[in-house]
Amino acid sequence: MKKKILISIAILVIISINSCKRKDENTSLEQKFNNSKIIAKHRSKELFNIFNKELTKEETKYLKFLYAYMPLSDLADYSGEFYLKHVKATIAAKNEMQWASSIPENVFFHFVLPHRVNNENLDTARIVFFNELKIRIKGLSMYDAAIEVNHWCHEKVEYRPADGRTSSPLATMKTAFGRCGEESTFAVAAMRSVCIPARQVYTPRWAHCDDNHAWVEVWADGQWYFLGACEPQPVLNLGWFNESASRAMLVHARAYGEYHGIEEINVTTSQYNDINVVDRYAKTFKQFVKISDAKGNPVDNAKVEYKLYNYAEFYPITTKISDKKGMSHLTTGFGDLLIWASKGSDYGFEKVKIGDKDTVCIVMSNPEFENLAWELKAPASSNKLKVELSEGQIEENKIKLHYEDSVRNVYVSTFISKENYLKIYNKKSFWKYVKASRGNYNEIISFITNNKDYDWAKPLLDIIAKKDLRDCKAEILNDQMNNSLDYAKEYSPEIFTKYILNPRIDLEMLLAYKQFLINKFTKAEAENFKSDPNKLIKWIKDSVEINNNAQAYNLPITPIGVYNLRVSDSRSRNIFFVAACRSFGIPARLEQGTKVPQYFFENKWIDVFFDAKPKQYQRFKVNFKVEAKNLKYTPQYYHHFTLAKFEQNHFKTLELGEYQDVDKIGDLHLIAGDYRLLTSNRLTSGKILVNIKFFKITNDTIIGLTFPENKIDLKVQGTIDRKKLSDFINYKDQRAKLLQETANIVIAIIQPDKEPSKHVLNDVQKIKRDFEVLNNSIVFIIPKKDLSATFKIEDYPNLPYRTIFKITDKKPDDLFNLKIDCETHSFPKIIIANPKGEVIFYSEGYKTGIGNDILKLL
């Protein structure tokens, strides 16, 4: 009896604790909701009048949760009606799907309900996707439904590289392709639409190659699994990236709101938590870091950046804050990191080999910068994620993938053809824009046909990003034309096109902002702004509140959103300034490299500093000069070197264009100060040689570029039969005949519909100029069983001239008697053989930058 009483008391205590916890959470949620109301007071009607409608308790609860954690962009650019539609669609899926009742509330609120996956433009995809998917997955288990949803995703979208702006899911579906960040956003949206908890997981940077990657985790039947977005496999926990993920230093996922799960939390903001899930993929170590001042006292609230070498810079894969004891920690892979700590005017740093010490001590003593030469290592791969499939599973999945390719191709075939376009519109010179617009062709054609000033329509279509052609509305382009051409004669064609006519400023969502802003100010105000842009700067300072903490997502608010909300982060405020200038006939831009806003006045660019102007404020002309001798490749920014400026106690890399050839960077005009030049050499062995040079810019400067050298020992790794390869190629055309005269030969065995092989094709395009100087050829061999209907050679127009494609129904290795010891049978396979048939380089699997590896070895 006594035992039963004690058990009853214990149960009551637990119930009481949980009740208090829920009460505290509800109170916290209400406070955050009210805080959003205060922040968005200038859009109160558009956002909060929705609560005056007859809403169910469930609808109210879900809406309040979304509003409580919204970034400024979502409060600024969307309406209450939009969010209510989203909530209603979520509830409909929850009521329809048989597994919904098994989902814990914590998982549902953070990984089903949220309208946002990451930094994409928002749309009504949840409604569209639910209506397409609900019948398709009826009767399936949660696990099997997740696989089937991914097959549906593959029907809609395939991988192709694209710029850093993340399209909305519906825009990605309209285009029928996207980069991995868009594929994973699309797949998460699809999963959530049918009440399958899902989250985008992301390695900010790989350690073993210059790239990053995003994929998806889904919750099914009580546990989390992973999958390659839009790249379905017969089972979960399998993707082409399994081996790469086993070498990751960090894999994180973003949980909307204040999430409390079992995972390690890396970053906490007012809108989301970033959670660390790397231990699911790789062998890891919990690295502790102790921060102290020059006297040995622990430093709390220090900013601790865990930086990984990638893209020729040290990129912060995560940033933490030290506790009262000066401690910070990160669960990470067994590679090398640069850990940088700063607070106030103090800083300190250490290169750390993870796992060497339990605790690394960093003293913030403001050390003098001395030139450094480092050798860095990436983690080794492991079999932690190894999955074996039967031949039957592999073949059945291939059949499905081919069918899904055909479904997607049927949709793509509905895009207007050149023949039909010319029959109807007869504007041949505009066809390239219509073709590039893909599923958005109606909008681009509408703009072309409704604008008679073709002399400016073409420059406008040339200047916007390729992705803009695929998701931009005609009204946006019309707005630019209608409200820009009056200023065309005031400036040179280049200045006018780039900095007035151009609607694209950064990576913001494009809207028709010019007429909107013109209407919000009187004619006299607009003329005052144009004659003295400082008056516009003053208006912005007086009218727009800056709240960077409320916009933690890397997502700009639109200029219209900034005006309406009157609250902004610094980046979006700068974009708003540029948009307003262009609307009033003032050329403006975000300066290349530093992103400082500038306006063009009296034939010179004027920097704008809304906050305090830098102490050392003077710009000097800076150029790069290659001093290294006998280089076989053209040095590229973000691949072989970067330049960074020391600001606020850390180095910030200048944004000079990804893989930009050094000779195309041109003159830079940089603010005086301390800079860091990083030059590097990523070796085929996996090691990275890094030289770090620190210097001041106090006058016009030429920066000499030399690169860490490594003597290449070309060991013979195997052999091929070059005569047999020659017989297989069958020399008929000029390129094939050149192969007979070639010195070394590059063979790439690829699966062209798979992302790793697409990277190879894109990497080889980047080395076209340097490759063609050499007396070498490259042969791409495609197994017939891996040839998809979506592959088109013309999608890769910049391959070197000495490039040959061959398709075979035989085992590729047998075509030239490849004999090698280290095969793992993963694709793509890259082989370099000398005239004797000796294999001097062999690589398997995913690796970006393979083009430069090839150049170094030829």
Image (cartoon, rainbow, N blue to C red):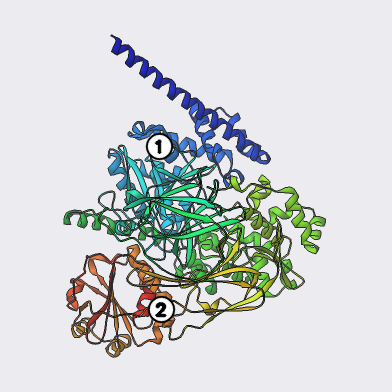
Closer-to-camera residue (496/290): 290
Q: Position of residue 313 (x, y in %)?
A: 48, 65
Q: Residue furthest front?
A: 295
Other residues around mark 2 within 10 Å, as few (<14) / some (14–19) / many (≥20)? few
Q: Mark 2 vs mark 1: which is more N-terminal?
A: 1
Closer-to-camera residue (14/406): 14
Q: Is residue 504 above or below residue 29?
A: below
Q: Position of residue 54 (x, y in %)?
A: 56, 27
Closer-to-camera residue (656/735): 656
Other residues around mark 1 within 10 Å, as few (<14) / some (14–19) / many (≥20)? some
Hey, what amino acid is under mark 1?
A: Val
Does residue 178 appear anywhere in the picture?
no
What SS does tag 2 mark? loop
Does residue 78 appear anywhere in the picture?
yes
Instruction: Say left or right for 815 vs 791.
Output: left
Q: Position of residue 76 (x, y in %)?
A: 61, 45
Closer-to-camera residue (408/760): 760
Q: Which residue is mark 1?
A: 107
What SS does tag 1 mark? helix
Q: Position of residue 331 (x, y in %)?
A: 39, 49
Hey, what amino acid is under mark 2?
A: Glu
Q: Residue furthest top?
A: 1
Q: Is residue 628 above or below residue 580?
A: below
- Please give the label number shown on residue 709: 2
Res 249 quadrant in image: bottom left
Instruction: Say left or right for 528 vs 345.
Output: right
